[in-house]
Image: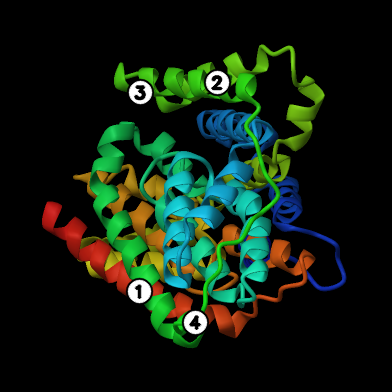
Amino acid sequence: MIEIILLLSLVGIAAGGFPVFRMNRATIALVGAVAMIVVGGLSLSEAFKSLDLNTLALLFAVMILVVNFRYSGLFKVIGQRISQLARSPRQLLALIIGVSGVLSAIFLNDTIVLMLTPLVVEIAMLEHRSPIPFLIGLATAANIGSMTTVIGNPQNILIGASSGIPFLAFSSYLVVPGILGLVAAWAIIVLVFRRDFAPRDFVRVEMVKARLIRPIFVKCLFAVAILIAGLVLGQSVTLSALASAALLLLTRRIKPERILRDINWSILVFFAGLFILIDGLRSSPLYPAAMRVADRVMMHSDALFTLVSVVLSNLISNVPAVMVLRPYLSTLPHAQHWWILLAMATTLAGNLTLLGSVANLIVAESAKRHGVTLGFWDYLKAGLPITAVTTVLSTLYLSLLR
């Protein structure tokens, strides 16, 4: 029964919902977690103990930081600067990819694409160009950039909290693959959509003027300084992030209700449900058998481990994939190498299809609300080669550092 509940939950999470029922990934994970407890997969007290509060607290703190930066007007100003600096469609794509990649390394990639998708659509429309290649650039760059830090995406937050790898040490392994990945994504998109980048008149567009709300922006910078100081002084990423979030909650300008309303509670519920589901899996006899197979096969080859991680991430989604492998990786010698490899593989796997990551789906849904349809096949013809090239390059690079 445990296996059936887990299978149904993971299928629903991978698909994003069930026919007839109005359920998203968060509610599927929560319902599955409750069912796991009801059938005796684990007790209520065991379920509460399975919740990784370190990871949940870090997610919450980063969300508070992002919400405040949004209220400062930073993301709108960035969109305006992109439109002013671009002199050609290729340069516009490079700016979108660069900004998306850098911001996603600092903030959650899902939040960045939510902020930038309407701006990218607006810029492309004003240029009388198809927004599709630029939207694909935004989504793939957000995934690639988020790979480089422990706070870039949900699965990296989980890996950082589970492995204990210091912030700077984590990034030192993945910054170079991240830069190479962004360059590769730009080149592949230009090649795949070469007709959209054919030379023709490119006029600088003028968007509605945006401005920074300086008091909020300055306070956000102080909060980031606290975060960086904590990391440099060797404090945990979670404590440093909570300290910066606490500063931002001391405010006279923004009502706390507005900040809390804009927190993405669905992600927190999703994580909580998954912690319980995956912990219930470990009580199944199938789990240790699967891990023994993994020990004999995957852990002796970086390439094979990466391939399995990419496939598993696309079958059940990247966060569940990390949670399934997390208990086993913690017991391995040279565990840091495998954690870094897992962060790279599960993140880059998100670029394979439109359904591969939440960031991709956010781009598609947000663009649709603005009258632009990003189709599965349009995305796949760029996403497939981007995933293949970036994953191979990153695996080779990390293998050389081993």
Q: Could you tell me the amino acid type at mark 4? A: Arg
Looking at the image, which residue is at 41% across and 58% down? 144
Whole-number angstrom distance, CA of label 4 to CA of label 2: 41 Å
Spot occupied by residue 371 in the image (x, y as percentages of width and height): 77, 71
Q: Could you tell me the amino acid type at mark 1? A: Ala
Query: In this figure, which residue is indicated by the disc labeled 3?
Result: 231
Spot occupied by residue 125 in the image (x, y as percentages of width and height): 67, 70
Residue 200, disc: 4
> Does the CB distance between marks 3 and 2 fall below 8 Å?
no
Instruction: Give the number of marks.
Output: 4
The numbered mark, 4 or 3, whose residue comes first in the sequence reads 4
The numbered mark, 1 or 2, whose residue comes first in the sequence reads 1
Spot occupied by residue 391 in the image (x, y as percentages of width and height): 32, 67
Q: Nearer the viewer, residue 267 or 93?
A: 93
Mark 4 vs mark 3: give the one in front: 4
The numbered mark, 3 or 1, whose residue comes first in the sequence reads 1
Whole-number angstrom distance, CA of label 1 to CA of label 2: 36 Å
Residue 218, disc: 2
Mark 1 vs mark 4: give the one in front: 4
Spot occupied by residue 150 in the image (x, y as percentages of width and height): 41, 40
Residue 232, disc: none
> Does the CB distance between marks 3 and 1 fall below 8 Å?
no
What SS does tag 3 mark? helix
Query: In this figure, which residue is indicated by the disc labeled 1?
Result: 187
Looking at the image, which residue is at 61% across and 80% down? 376
Residue 315 higher or lower than 269, as above or below: below
Mark 4 vs mark 2: give the one in front: 4
Q: Quadrant of the N terminus?
A: bottom right
Residue 45 higher or lower than 152, as above or below: above
What SS does tag 4 mark? loop
* Location of residue 291 by image quarter: bottom left
